[in-house]
Amino acid sequence: MEQKRMLIGGEWVEAGSGEWSDNLNPHSGEVICQVPSATVEDVDRAVEAAHKAYYETWREIHPADRAKLMFKLADAIDECADDIARMETADMGKPYNQSSGDVPATADIFRFYAGIADKIEGECLVTPAKTFGYTLHEPFGVVASITPWNFPVVMIGMKGAPALAAGNCTIFKPASSSPSTALELGRLATEVGFPPGVVQVITGEGGAMGSRLAGHPLVGKVTFTGSTAVGRKILEASINNIAKVTLELGGKTANIVLPDADMDMAVAAAARTIFLNCGQICTAGSRLLLHESIKDEFLAKLIPLAESLKVGDPFDEATKLGPISSKQQYDTVLSYIDTGKSEGATLLTGGSGPDDPALAHGFYVSPTIFGDVTADMTIAQEEIFGPVLSVTTFKDEDEAVEIANGTDYGLAAALWTRDVSAVHNLAARLEAGIVWVNCTNIFGPWMPYGGYKVSGLGFEAGIEGLKEFTRVKTVLIDTTDTPTTWPTE
Ligand code: NAD
C-alpha cells in the first residue's frame, strides 16, 4: 500500500501520531493509498515553519521573482498534466475527460496571478498640508487554505495563486477524501524552487486539526471553501486569532427559464449545470424554475437528455457522470432522494445507480429529476451536492424571484430569456453573488465571486479575490520638523 507523506517545512513527513487515513477510489471502493492523519501538533509545526519562512525568506524576495516561481510552477503543472488528471480521477471519481481540463485551468490560474504579483500597488493619499501619506497592500504572512473535494486541484490554484502572488506563505489542507493532487502540487512547488515552508500541505480529517489551523495565533488569513456548516466552525475558530476569513460555501442555484428563452439551449444547460461533476458543484443549478407554459415541452426534452448521459467508469472517455466522490456523500444523496419521494415530489427519472455489475462497488447515482417540487420541500431548500434536480413552476416574474430567493443560500442564479428588460429587472432582484444570463457555470480567475446570505463571506478570484490576501497599511509622514501640539494649543 502506497503511503504518501505530507509536506511540512520542506520535508516529507508522517503525522506525529504515526496514524494514517485511507484514501478510497469511489469507482472501485478500494483503498488507493494512505495519507498521514495530521494532528494539532503537526498543524503547529506547519504554521511555525510558514511563519519562519515568511520572516526569514519569502518577504525578502522581490514580487517579480515570486512571479517567476509561480510561472515555473504553472509550467510544471502543465508538464505533469496527465498524471495529475489521473490522480484526481482516481481520488474523487471525476471523469478523466473533465479532470484533464481542470489541470491546465489550474496552471492558468497561477499564470493569471503571477502576472499581477509585481503590480500590487498602494495609493498616494491627499493629506493635510506639509504631510505625505500613502498606503501599502501587505501580505498577512501565514495563510491557511482549507479546500473541499469537488475541484481539488482547481481549489489549490484559486487559493494558492493569489495568496502567493500577494506575498504570503500558504498551508493547504485538502479534503481528506481527495488529497493527492494537493500533495502533487506541493511536490512541484518544491521542485521549481519555492523556499521550504512557503508552500506546505497537511492531510487528514478537518475536525480538531482543521480548527487549530483556522484559529492558530500565527495565521493571519483563512481562506475556506466547503459547506456552510463547516464555514460556521471556521468562523468560531477564528475568534481566537481574529484572522481575516474568506468563506465560499454552499448553494442552491435557481436556474430560471422564461417563456421566450431559446429552449434547446436552456435544456442542454439545465442538464449540464446539475449533472456535470455529478452535481458536486457549489453553483450547480439544482433548482430548475420553469414558466408554467413551457414545463411540459421542456421536460419532454430534458428527461431523455438526462437518461442519455453515460454513467460509468470515470476513465471511460464516453462517461459524463462518474461516481459520487465518497461513500458518505453517496449515502447523503440517496437519503435526499428518499426524502424527495416521501415529501410528495414525483420522481421523473433516476433515483438510484445504474444496473451494471461493473459499477456494483462504486458510489453511483444516475441523473435524477424530481417534478412537482414545491418551494418548501427539503430537496428544494437544502444543498444535496449530487445529480438531483428539482423542478418547480412559476406563473410570473414576481413568483420566480420569490421562489429563487426563498432559501438561506445566495451563491448564484441563472436566467434564460431574450428580453433585455427582464434581464435587468431580475438580475437586480435576485439575491445571489453571481447571475448568469443565457449561460451557467462560467468561471475563471478573472471573475470575482462571493456568496450572498449563508453562501459566503468575502470574494474569491479576480482582483477582488487578490485583495482578500492583503491588508492595508497607511504610512503618514510629517515633513515640517515642528513639535506635535495638543488640540487646544
Ligand atoms: P466540507 O465543509 O465538509 O469540508 C471542506 C474542508 O473543510 C475539508 O478540507 C474538510 O476536511 C475541512 N474541515 C472539516 N471540518 C473542519 C473544521 N472543523 N475545521 C476546519 N476545517 C474543517 O465540504 P466538502 O464536503 O468537502 O465540500 C462540499 C461543500 O463545499 C458543499 O457545501 C459545496 O457547496 C461547497 N463548495 C463551495 C464552493 C464555493 O465557491 N462557494 C465551491 C466548491 C464547494
Image: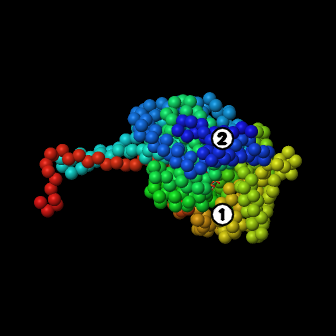
Q: Secondary structure at mark 2?
A: helix
Instruction: Read off the residue under disc 2.
Output: 180
Number of residues whose C-alpha sits closer than 10 Å to that of mark 2, classed few (under 14), some (14–19) or many (20 or more): many
Q: Amino acid at mark 2?
A: Ser
Q: First in sequence: mark 2 or mark 1? A: 2
Q: Residue at x 49, y 33 (%)?
A: 195
Q: Nearer the viewer, residue 225 or 171?
A: 171
Q: Position of residue 198 (x, y in %)?
A: 50, 38
Q: Residue 342 placed where, x, y %?
A: 77, 69
Residue 307 in view of the camera:
yes
Q: Amino acid at mark 1?
A: Glu
Tell me which corner region of the image, top left, top right, bottom left or bottom right, holds residue 417.
bottom right
Figure quadrant, ligand 1: bottom right
The quarter holding residue 397 reads: bottom right
Residue drawn where x is 63% and y is 39% of the image: 5
Query: Where does the image place residue 126, in percent across and percent down from the top left?
Result: 26, 49
Look at the picture and state if 175 lies above or below 411.
above
Q: Is residue 60 above or below residue 37?
A: above
Labelled disc at residue 191 = none
x 16%, y 53%: residue: 484
Tell me the quarter of the image containing the N terminus: top right
Q: Mark 1 — residue?
A: 382
> Which color scheme is applied?
rainbow
Left-right relation of 165 to 92:
left
The x and y percentages for residue 23 are 71, 45
Q: CA distance from mark 2 to mark 1?
A: 29 Å
Q: Establish whether ligand 1 lies closer than 8 Å to the Cβ of label 2.
A: no
Q: Is residue 147 left or right of residue 361?
A: left
The answer, for residue 27, to whether it is visible in the render is no
